[in-house]
Amino acid sequence: MNFRAISISYGKGQLPIRLPMGVEPTIIRKAPLPKIRDQRAAVRVALERPIQARPLRVLAQGRRSACILICDITRPVPNPIFLRPMIEDLLAAGIPSRQIRVLVATGLHRPNEGAELDELVGDPWVLSTVRVENHFARNDADHVDLGPTRTRGTPVKIDRRFIEADLKIATGLVEPHFMAGYSGGRKVIAPGVAHSDTIRTFHSARFMEDPLARSCNLAGNPLHEEQLEIVRMIGEVYGLNTVIDEQRDLVHVTFGEIIASHLAAVEFIRGITEIAVPRRFHTLVTSAAGYPLDKTYYQTIKGMVTPLDILAPGGTLIIASECSEGLGSPEFYEAQARLAEQGADAFLQTILRKELAGIDEWQTEMQLRPMRIGRVQLYTTGLSAEERRLTGVEVIESVDAAIQESMTRTGNRELAVIPEGPYVVPFYAGEEAHREPFHGAVASSA
């Protein structure tokens, strides 16, 4: 045996990678977490001991209606664990089942319907007890106009079903997000159930090109600040936030006032996902985190952007993503076609002048970040020949061969591997790095 094997997340399983002997990979993972023995009991504790709020059963008393937001299918949120106990509390408090709505926060993504909706909710009792509906960002009549934010003038239009509910709750997964710092909490509202105008405004270049709009950063992050302002414009909102491990098991849950409960979950996860790394690498292998995030190339770009701080200039970033549903939306397809036709510099110039971003073109804009630093290679089994061309990156047939070629080209046999892709954020901690203190553990060689 003249190689060593490791694996990274790919689709609903793992992609094995064979490394040449003599290569000592630095494996960058989340810090280990103790399992919760009884996950449903942990949810019950969170609902009964909330952060800056009363217990859910008390909050629900005297309310006529309730709306619970859940993330769409692109996020592996453990909905089956917490939706039923939440709804049972609302029913016990006297809210009629017909006045309880679960609203899928799709943003500008497609709706989740049929078997996909069953999978997302994960509990037939929920589907048969309350209304479960999708948000449609382009339906003008579905939204309430709250006016612009004071700070940056973002038009705030939010799904009427959420705004008009007596009790408003957003649920989600707290994980690193390559634009907004961290997902969950306020992000489930905007962009989750916001109008297209709202979403396209704070996905425009004046937000996206801000250097503070990056993974794990909330301080001065313009997207995060706008989201907080939108939450405050809405008023009383509560949040249930979850954290999961590599096996997608629930390891932490908070409930309470939406901003406070989200920040509590962020503080918990910082020490798990922000990983200090002592050097940069000329060869870096990562994933798009597997299913469901790697269903489209659109979501795959997150995995390209997240590890850039440890990619050496001119280095090679190799990412594996199944892309079982192809590129993504028709709008993203069109944006990628413009990138392929115009080139990176010309594409960027066309969007810098826009007040409203074209739908989904912000993801193409984010792809420019790794392209400015080094070489990007994609391994996938789910794209057609034309879709591969439109990725704008080099599509490879073998991760093993790409690793060997990169090492031969650079003469450097050091390798970084991030099995879980964008759910882990490595930061360069070398002598010349100028960042705030790290919370994560230093990555170790496997």
Image: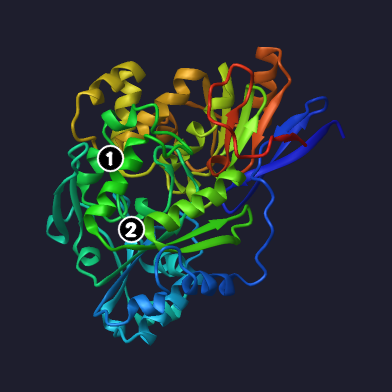
Q: Amino acid at mark 2?
A: Ala
Q: Quadrant of residue 278?
A: top right
Q: Are marks 1 and 2 in contact (CB under 8 Å)?
A: no
Q: Looking at the picture, does residue 343 appear above or below residue 31?
A: above
Q: Residue at x 49, y 62 (%)?
A: 254
Left or right, 193 with reference to 126: left
Location of residue 55 with respect to 179 vertically, above or below = below
Q: Position of residue 362 (x, y in %)?
A: 32, 34
Q: Nearer the viewer, residue 380 or 308?
A: 308
* Three-letter amino acid code of the residue under disc 1: Glu
Which residue is painted at 87% across and 35% down in the image?
1
Residue occupying the point 32% across, 51% down: 109
In the picture, the quarter occupied by the C terminus is top right
Crowd rating for badge 2 (residues with CA inside 10 Å; few <14, some 14–19, many 20+): many
Query: At which x and y percent is residue 419?
Result: 64, 41
Q: Is residue 361 left or right of residue 180?
A: left
- Residue 105 numbered mark, or none: 2
Say which label, 1 or 2, has the lower sequence index: 2
Marks 1, 2: nearer the viewer: 2
Name the residue nearer the viewer: 427 or 219.
Answer: 219
In x, y percent, where is residue 265?
A: 50, 54
Q: Which mark is residue 278?
A: none
Nearest the camera: 331 or 155? 155
Q: Dot 1: within a 10 Å radius of its alpha carbon, few (fewer than 14), some, or many (20 or more) residues?
A: few
User: What residue does disc 1 label?
Assistant: 331
Q: Is residue 368 visible?
A: yes
Element type at mark 1 = helix
